[in-house]
Image (cartoon, rainbow, N blue to C red):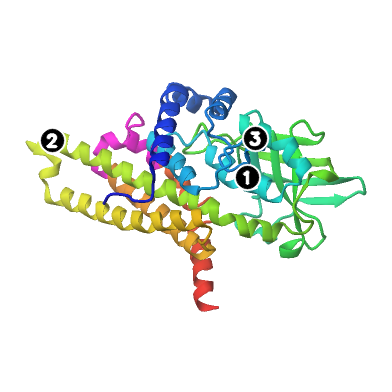
Amino acid sequence: MQRQIFTEEHDAFRETVRTFLTKEVLPHYEQWEKDGIVSREAWRAAGRQGLLGLAVPEEYGGGGNTDFRYSAVLAEEFTRAGTPGLALGLHNDIIGPYLTGLGTDEQKRRWLPGFCSGETITAIAMTEPGAGSDLQGIRTTAEDMGDHWLLNGSKTFISNGILADLVVVVAKTTPEGGAKGLSLIVVERGADGFERGRNLDKIGQKSQDTAELFFNDVRVPKENLLGERDGAFIHLMTKLAQERMGIAVAGIAAAEHLLEITTRYVKEREAFGRPLSRLQHVRFEIAEMATECAVTRTFLDRCIVDHSDGTLDAVHASMAKWWATELQKRVADRCLQLHGGYGYMTEYPVARAFTDGRIQTIYGGTTEIMKEIIGRSLLA
């Protein structure tokens, strides 16, 4: 089906993103995968190209455009290129809204210009060794010391954890914590007592630095409180829909791309003297995946439009996230199988897509959490 949600402006932006990937990302990506981290220069190049801070007001150096369709284009093209390591979506669509929506004028002037130029790389630190999707299990504390916060605790699985210059930390600001006792505290690079652990060794997305973070009596200025004191739970709940949409968009884009490259492969690869595509089982596999992708794409495009209009609710964002990412996982597995032994070789895109995409059903809220959100909305 012909997609109908994009305008000529979106199409022009797509070409800009593809040019950026060709010039600034793809020539270096293999080295980044070996290094386990991307170059800071790539972030600055993204800033120069106008790919950072798409929704940040122009007065701070951003694009001033809150149309989520531009973020969707960015996610789709990075996914198709197989380059998730340069986590622009995390920066733009997850952390950006916290800074623009909750930041004071002084905070915006201090942080947003670097955010948009690529000089300031960001991360958000929610997950702890003993608290993943359950935010009420967070143990990191921020004690009010009058003229500063005293931050203690640890976080793990933090994307951009090594590179980040600005980390939004979820911490308890009341002894009980939980839904009414969490706050967002912004920690800046170089703060005494702020230490980074090892760059974690993952099965996929090797170039996307993921780290442990430690806070030992870190003195954080009072003016680095982001949003309302004890208001983090509400802040987080209202921003998660966009995070989940970004993951869902990448999920369906990955599934579609895997289907494309596998369709080409089975036409070219021969077995028993004829192309694999002549085998009924292979045709059925392709037909099933194509149908599932088409149906999912229709739903996702509707969600993209609704989110751009500000009408998408958390329940439908959760539906989009769990369905698209589970589809991505199934398609990756089936496409690898159709590639046979070659699918297990890392030089084939299907192999990397298989390992890179496995995290999709986990981060941003696991599939099980998404189903719980949906179920509660229907059965409360």
- Give the residue at the far bottom of this rendering: 380
Q: What residue would you read off at disc 2?
A: 270
Residue type at the position of mark 1: Ile
Residue type at the position of mark 3: Phe
Q: Secondary structure under badge 3? A: helix
x 55%, y 47%: residue: 66
x 54%, y 29%: residue: 46
Indicate whether 19 appears above or below 100.
above
Indicate whether 98 appears above or below 14.
below
Would you say residue 135 is visible in this rendering? yes
Q: Nearer the viewer, residue 22 or 193?
A: 22
Q: What residue would you read off at disc 1?
A: 95
Label 1 crowd (10 A; few <14 / some 14-19 / many >=20)? many
Label 3 crowd (10 A; few <14 / some 14-19 / many >=20)? many
Residue 115: assigned label: 3
Q: Real-space Cα distance between discs 1 and 2?
A: 48 Å
Q: Real-space Cα distance between discs 2 and 3?
A: 50 Å
Would you say residue 364 is visible in this rendering? no
Q: Earlier in the sequence, mark 1 or mark 2?
A: 1
Q: Earlier in the sequence, mark 2 or mark 3?
A: 3
Residue 302 locus on image (x, y percent):
40, 58
The magenta stretch is 337-354
Task: Count up the numbered dots.
Answer: 3
Q: Earlier in the sequence, mark 3 or mark 1?
A: 1
Q: Secondary structure under badge 1? A: helix
Q: Nearer the viewer, residue 268 or 184?
A: 184
Q: Is residue 161 magenta?
A: no
Residue type at the position of mark 2: Glu
